[in-house]
Amino acid sequence: MGSTDKETQVDSFFSNKTAKIFVAGHRGLVGSAIVRKLEEVGFTNLVLKTHQELDLTRQTDVEAFFALEKPHFVILSAAKVGGIHANNTYPADFIGINLQIQTNVIDASYRNGVKKLIFLGSSCIYPKFAPQPIQEDALLTGPLEPTNEWYAVAKIAGIKMCQAYRLQYGWDAISGMPTNLYGPNDNFHPQNSHVLPALIRRFHEAKVSDAKEVVVWGTGSPLREFLHVDDLADAVVFLMNKYSGLGHVNVGSGKEVTIKELAELVKEVVGFQGDLVWDSTKPDGTPRKLMDSSKLANLGWAPKISLRDGLVDSYKWYLENVKQ
Ligand SMILES: NC(=O)C1=CN([C@@H]2O[C@H](COP(=O)(O)OP(=O)(O)OC[C@H]3O[C@@H](n4cnc5c(N)ncnc54)[C@H](OP(=O)(O)O)[C@@H]3O)[C@@H](O)[C@H]2O)C=CC1
Ligand SMILES: C[C@H]1O[C@H](OP(=O)(O)OP(=O)(O)OC[C@H]2O[C@@H](n3cnc4c(=O)[nH]c(N)nc43)[C@H](O)[C@@H]2O)[C@@H](O)[C@@H](O)C1=O
């Protein structure tokens, strides 16, 4: 093994709280949680650009931004993101936009002297029928889940690009693979969001309109692992400080529920009294994707927020920020 493929622990990230950090996608679910976390631990020099101010798909604009700002660290949480329906409906956007954003940001970061970058992928990078819980080395061992293969291929390319730059240039680019996330600043779109925010909205709207039933997609049997985004942000900052290695790192809660159990829990938290109806014309997606996050646990990190507490927090955020 050469020096570039060793997994080492470093502590340089926390040593200078005035270091300039570019958080790409800072208004999204993940980016906003990372900004909260960085501010909480005392970082004072964050560079933040809205999509309108800097379109990360535009290579020349990204290069000009990095040449001007010269950030020390980059947290790449900008991406084209959506749930099962959006992934299945807009395959060109999910592969094209994500390849463009990540290629531009990773390459410009390296060329402009960024000390360290973290790229965020997703648990959907793994084969549809990967052995459970899914270890990092299951990557590229089998066919992907068709509903999100375009997004997954882009994310796999992002991991490989970080690895290639580490191998060729000795550059410190790492990758974290979060499981399904939720929390403040989530996307509550009725069709294009992920299941948890979609159900919060649907159950809430059914409650206020006194509807008799709520339609939930698929069969209810798929299993999913959920992590509150504040836990994810904590893990990202932890990895920036503690981890430097070639291999990507799973970031999960280690707890899974069926979609039926999730729907019952959302129903209870929202306080909807009616029935659930299953729309089996909608895709289930991957039957199960529980990640093995022991690599991260062995580095010393653990999640703190339970699904019930996180759900209560998300519903509160929805009531205060989204509902009309
Ligand atoms: N949500 C989840 O369950 C999971 C998310 N992840 C990963 O976490 C990361 C962040 O996801 P999440 O926070 O949920 O996504 P969001 O959609 O909430 O946020 C994405 C952010 O990226 C910005 N963005 C998108 N396109 C561009 C662009 N062309 N130029 C500049 N900014 C852009 C968006 O700005 P705007 O809205 O203005 O377009 C937004 O601020 C992604 O890499 C995703 O793959 C991984 C696993 C699960
Ligand atoms: C994070 C991850 O997110 C996506 O994968 P997914 O885990 O399948 O995400 P999902 O949250 O959209 O669905 C989870 C399950 O829930 C069911 N389901 C029920 N009712 C609704 C519903 O109303 N909306 C949605 N979206 N799903 C519903 C749905 O049928 C499925 O069985 C990837 O595309 C990929 O982008 C990715 O990385």
Image (cartoon, rainbow, N blue to C red):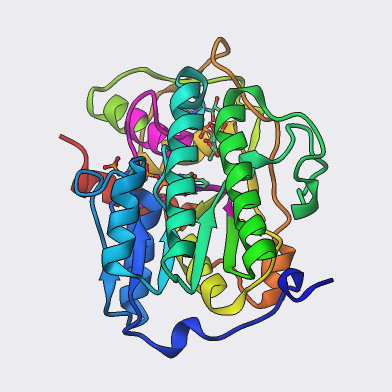
Q: On the rendered structure, is 134 left or right of 121?
A: right
* The stretch drawn in magenta includes residue 194: yes
Image-quarter location of ligand 1: top left
- Residue 32, how many percent across, how many down? 32, 58
Instruction: Report the residue at 61% width, 20% height from top.
Output: 219
Q: 299 or 246: which is nearer to us?
A: 246
Q: Can the viewer see residue 224?
A: no
Residue 248, image quadrant: bottom right
Instruction: Report the residue at 70% width, 78% height from top.
Output: 8
Q: On the rendered structure, is 324 left or right of 300?
A: left
Residue 132, image quadrant: top right
Instruction: Report the residue at 39% width, 48% height from top.
Output: 78
- Residue 235, how many percent across, how many down? 53, 67
The single residue placed furthest to the bottom in the displayed view is 15
Instruction: Report the residue at 39% width, 27% height from top.
Output: 192
- Residue 163, how many percent across, how many down? 66, 58
Q: Quadrant of the C terminus?
A: top left
Q: 294 or 49: which is nearer to us?
A: 49
Q: 309 or 324: which is nearer to us?
A: 324
Magenta-tinted stretch: 177-202
- Residue 89, how many percent across, how many down? 47, 18
